[in-house]
Image: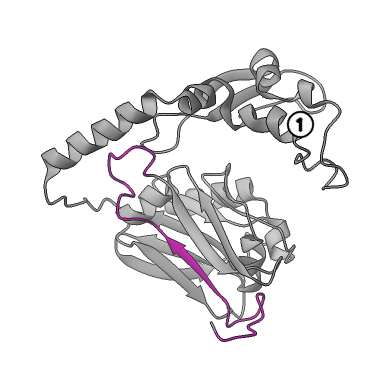
Amino acid sequence: LEKGVDPLGPDNKIIYMTGPLTGTISPSSGRFSAVTKSPLTGLWGEANSGGQWGRDLKRAGFDGIIIEGVAPRPVYLVVDHGKAELRDAEGIWGTSVAETTKSIKDALGKRFNVSCIGVAGENLVRYSAILNDVHRALGRCGLGAVMGSKRLKAIAVAGNQKFTLADREAFREAAKRASDFANESLLKMTLEVYGTAMVLDLVNVKGGFPTRNWQSGTCSYADAINGPAINEKILVGRKACFACPIACGRVIEVKSGKYACQG
């Protein structure tokens, strides 16, 4: 980028990128990153996400995607087994992440995985996120606003490209050693039981809990929303990202009240 580039201008870029292990059997290899000049800080902005999308981009035939410029009207990008095409998104502009994902899957087929923005990104909220697999987030640095500034609603990826390994058996052994090492980790065991909410109490004690949008660094009712509370009150299952032995994702059910939901 040239010095002084406007983060929400056409000359800024968003770069989605996988790694050399993405999509392999190496543990936790489903993750991917996206980088840009942040509209929130005016500096380097980077976010990382899990789920299945990183693997699916690799299977679609690409290691990464570089997005620049600005579309004259809302569009979404379809990447299908080595081919890329921009399609009209005016019909889904103004819809939520869940609605956008469903609409694109209904149009293209269930084999597609979707990374997209919601209304906050469209409206250039400077801390808005990009979501994939509906619930997984590129949550840092306002990447959603940059995507919205380019009028890019979503990227849908699909493919069945295979990965070639120089020594498949040696790689399998190395991946097993890494997985065994992870399985012996106390951190992994704790994440399995409580998910990422395991850190809530520690962060709260240290004054780093972003209560009321950082009006305070501590939360008076932390005991009601920490890992043990979630397990006791609403947890019904666990969900893992691609090739991840940890499965820190929580599947919950709120059975009654105005916040009743499951997912």
In the image, the segment drawn in magenta is: 2-29
Q: Is residue 79 magenta?
A: no
- Of 182 and 62, the residue lying toward us: 182
Q: Is residue 19 magenta?
A: yes
At x 69%, y 69%, the residue is 39
- Of 5 and 103, the residue lying toward us: 5
- Residue 109: image x %, image y %? 42, 49
- Residue 217: image x %, image y %? 82, 41
Q: Main secondary structure of the magenta part?
A: loop
Would residue 258 be found to the left or right of residue 94 on screen?
A: right
Q: Amino acid at mark 1?
A: Val
Would residue 112 be found to the left or right of residue 206 on screen?
A: left
At x 76%, y 39%, the residue is 209
- Residue 183: image x %, image y %? 37, 24
- Of 74 and 234, the residue lying toward us: 234
Mark 1 residue crowding within 10 angstroms, few (<14) / some (14–19) / many (20+): few
In the structure shown, which secondary structural element does the residue marked by tag 1 occupy?
Answer: helix
At x 39%, y 45%, the residue is 30
Task: Establish if 41 lies above or below 159.
Answer: below
